[in-house]
C-alpha cells in the first residue's frame, strides 16, 4: 500500500538570480497536505519570488520543484493550473465586473460558473451585492478579496498566498484565517508568504529567508 | 468544457473589453481612415494611379493597421499585470487562439471597411470581386496570426513601441508579396477577363501561409508566453 500523502511539495536546492544579484540560494523544503507553511523574511528576501517559482510562474536558476498530487508529479504548466495563487501583483480585468472576472477565469479553466454560483463565491469573500460593480470601482481591499475568490475558484489542493491580508480590514483578516483553516481541514497544503504575525501564527511550520 | 470553449471565453472577453473601452477599435479605425484620407487628398484631381499602386497601398494600410492596433493585446496584459492571472488559469494555446480570433475578426472587419473605400477613392474596380475577397480573407488571417504571435514576443521586451513592425515585416514578406499579386490579379492586372486562374497560385500561397502561421504559433506560443 502506498503510504505517501496525497499532496507533497518538495523544493530541492532552489536558487534564483536576477542578473548578477542572488535572491534565493539553496532553498530546500518538504511539505505535505494538511500543513500550513509560513515563509517570512525581510523585504527583498525573495518570499514572493519563491512563491512564483513554486507556482511555476518563474523558472529557478538552480534546483528543482516537485509537486506531487495523488502520486502524479506535475510539470510547471500543470502546476500553474493546479495551484491556487493570490498575490498583490496579480491583477484582474478592470473593464469587467467582479462577477464577470470570476466567470471568465472559471471558463478558461474549463469550469462552468453560473451567475448564482459566482454570487455565492463572491459572498464567501465578503463581496455580496458587489458582483455587478466594475472592477475599476473596487477598493484595494475588495480587489484583494476578489483575488482570494479567484485563488479558490477551482478548489485547489495547494494554496499559495502572498501577503493575503494586505489591504484587508479585520473581517478580511479573519476570513483569510478561515480560508487557511478550511484548506488545512480538507487536507490541502497552504504556503503563506508574509511578515504579518497574524498570518505567521496560522502556520505550524515557519520558514525564514535571509536578507 | 472543451478547448474551443475555453478559447471562446478568451475571444469573448477580448471583445467585451474592446466594446467597453474601444481602445484598439479606435486606434485601427483612426489609422486606416487617416491613411485613406491622406491618399485621397494627395490624389485629388489627379489621374488614378491604377490597380498596381492600389494593391500596394491597400496592403500598406493593412500591414501598418495590424502592427499598430493588434499589438496592444499582449502589451496591455503585461503592463496591467493581468498576464499573471491568465498564465495561471488558461492553457497557453487557449490564450493564443482566443486572441488570434479576436484580432482576425477586427482586422477582417477593418479590411471590409478599408478596401472598398480605398478602391473607390482610387477609381479602381475589381475585375473579380470573389478573388479579391478570398485574397483579403486568407491574407488577413495570416497577417493576424503572425501579428498576434509577434505581439506576444514583443510584450516580453522592454522596448515595445515600433518593435512589432520591425519583427513582423520579414516574416510577412511572402504573405505581402502574394497578397499584393493576388489583389492585382483580382483588380484585372494581367487578368482582363476577371478569371480565377491568374490568382490561384497566390490563393494557394496565402492559404498555406495562414495554415503554417497558425500551426507554428500554436506550437511555439507556450515558449513565448511562459518562458
Image: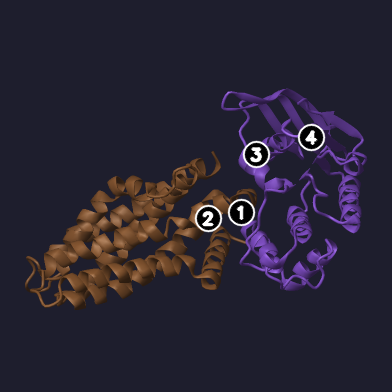
Chain colours: A purple, B brown
What residue is rendered at 26% in x and 72% in y? Answer: B37
Label 3 – label 1 distance at C-alpha: 16 Å
Name the secondary structure under disc 3. Answer: loop
- Residue A56 - label: 3
Q: Do the residues at pointers 2 and 3 share their chain?
A: no
In the image shown, does A192 or B128 lie closer to the viewer? A192
Packing grade of label 3 (10 A; few <14, some 14-19, many >=20) is many
Chain label for disc 4: A
Residue corresponding to mark 4: A8
Residue corresponding to mark 2: B76
Packing grade of label 2 (10 A; few <14, some 14-19, many >=20) is few
* Closer to viewer: mark 2 or mark 3: 2
Name the secondary structure under disc 2. Answer: helix
* Closer to viewer: mark 4 or mark 3: 3
Residue corresponding to mark 1: B82
Q: Do the residues at pointers 2 and 4 share their chain?
A: no
Label 1 – label 2 distance at C-alpha: 8 Å
Q: Are marks 3 and 1 in contact (CB under 8 Å)?
A: no
In the image shown, does A104 or B138 lie closer to the viewer? A104
- Residue A35 - label: none
Chain label for disc 3: A
Q: Do the residues at pointers 4 and 1 share their chain?
A: no
Q: Are marks 2 and 3 in contact (CB under 8 Å)?
A: no
Q: Position of residue A110 (x, y in %)?
A: 64, 59
Q: Are marks 1 and 2 in contact (CB under 8 Å)?
A: yes
Amino acid at each position: 500500500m502506498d503510504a505517501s500523502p496525497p499532496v507533497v511539495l518538495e523544493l530541492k536546492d532552489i536558487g534564483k538570480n536576477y542578473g548578477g544579484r542572488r535572491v534565493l540560494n539553496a532553498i530546500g523544503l518538504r511539505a505535505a497536505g494538511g500543513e500550513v507553511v509560513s515563509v517570512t523574511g525581510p523585504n527583498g528576501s525573495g518570499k514572493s519570488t519563491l512563491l512564483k517559482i513554486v507556482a511555476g510562474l518563474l523558472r529557478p536558476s538552480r534546483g528543482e520543484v516537485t509537486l506531487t498530487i495523488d502520486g502524479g508529479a506535475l510539470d510547471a504548466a500543470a502546476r500553474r493550473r493546479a495551484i491556487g495563487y493570490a498575490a498583490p501583483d496579480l491583477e484582474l480585468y478592470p473593464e469587467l465586473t467582479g462577477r464577470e472576472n470570476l466567470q471568465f477565469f472559471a471558463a478558461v479553466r474549463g469550469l462552468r460558473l453560473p451567475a448564482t454560483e459566482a454570487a455565492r463565491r463572491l459572498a464567501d469573500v465578503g463581496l455580496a451585492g458587489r458582483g455587478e460593480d466594475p472592477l475599476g470601482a473596487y477598493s484595494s481591499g475588495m480587489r484583494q478579496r476578489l483575488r482570494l475568490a479567484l485563488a479558490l475558484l477551482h478548489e485547489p489542493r495547494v494554496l499559495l498566498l502572498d501577503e493575503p491580508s494586505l489591504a484587508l480590514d479585520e473581517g478580511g483578516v479573519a476570513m483569510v484565517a478561515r480560508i487557511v483553516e478550511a484548506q488545512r481541514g480538507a487536507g490541502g497544503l497552504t504556503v503563506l508568504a508574509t511578515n504579518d504575525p497574524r498570518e505567521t501564527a496560522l502556520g505550524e511550520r515557519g520558514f525564514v529567508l535571509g536578507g | 468544457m472543451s478547448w474551443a470553449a475555453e478559447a471562446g471565453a478568451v475571444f469573448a472577453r477580448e471583445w467585451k473589453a474592446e466594446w467597453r473601452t474601444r481602445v484598439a477599435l479606435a486606434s485601427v479605425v483612426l489609422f486606416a481612415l487617416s491613411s485613406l484620407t491622406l491618399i485621397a487628398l494627395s490624389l485629388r484631381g489627379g489621374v488614378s494611379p491604377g490597380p498596381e499602386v492600389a494593391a500596394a497601398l491597400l496592403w500598406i494600410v493593412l500591414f501598418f493597421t495590424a502592427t499598430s492596433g493588434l499589438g496592444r493585446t499582449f502589451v496591455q496584459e503585461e503592463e496591467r499585470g493581468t498576464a499573471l492571472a491568465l498564465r495561471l488559469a488558461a492553457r497557453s494555446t487557449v490564450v493564443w487562439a482566443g486572441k488570434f480570433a479576436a484580432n482576425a475578426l477586427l482586422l477582417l472587419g477593418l479590411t471590409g471597411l478599408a478596401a472598398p473605400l480605398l478602391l473607390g477613392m482610387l477609381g479602381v474596380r475589381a475585375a473579380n470581386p470573389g478573388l479579391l475577397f478570398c485574397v483579403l480573407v486568407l491574407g488577413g488571417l495570416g497577417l493576424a496570426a503572425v501579428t498576434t504571435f509577434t505581439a506576444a514576443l514583443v510584450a516580453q521586451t522592454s522596448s515595445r513601441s515600433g518593435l512589432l513592425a520591425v519583427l513582423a515585416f520579414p516574416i510577412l514578406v511572402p504573405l505581402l508579396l502574394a497578397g499584393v499579386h493576388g489583389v492585382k490579379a483580382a483588380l484585372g492586372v494581367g487578368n482582363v477577363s476577371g478569371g480565377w486562374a491568374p490568382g490561384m497560385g497566390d490563393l494557394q500561397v496565402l492559404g498555406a501561409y495562414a495554415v503554417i502561421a497558425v500551426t507554428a504559433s500554436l506550437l511555439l506560443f507556450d515558449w513565448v508566453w511562459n518562458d
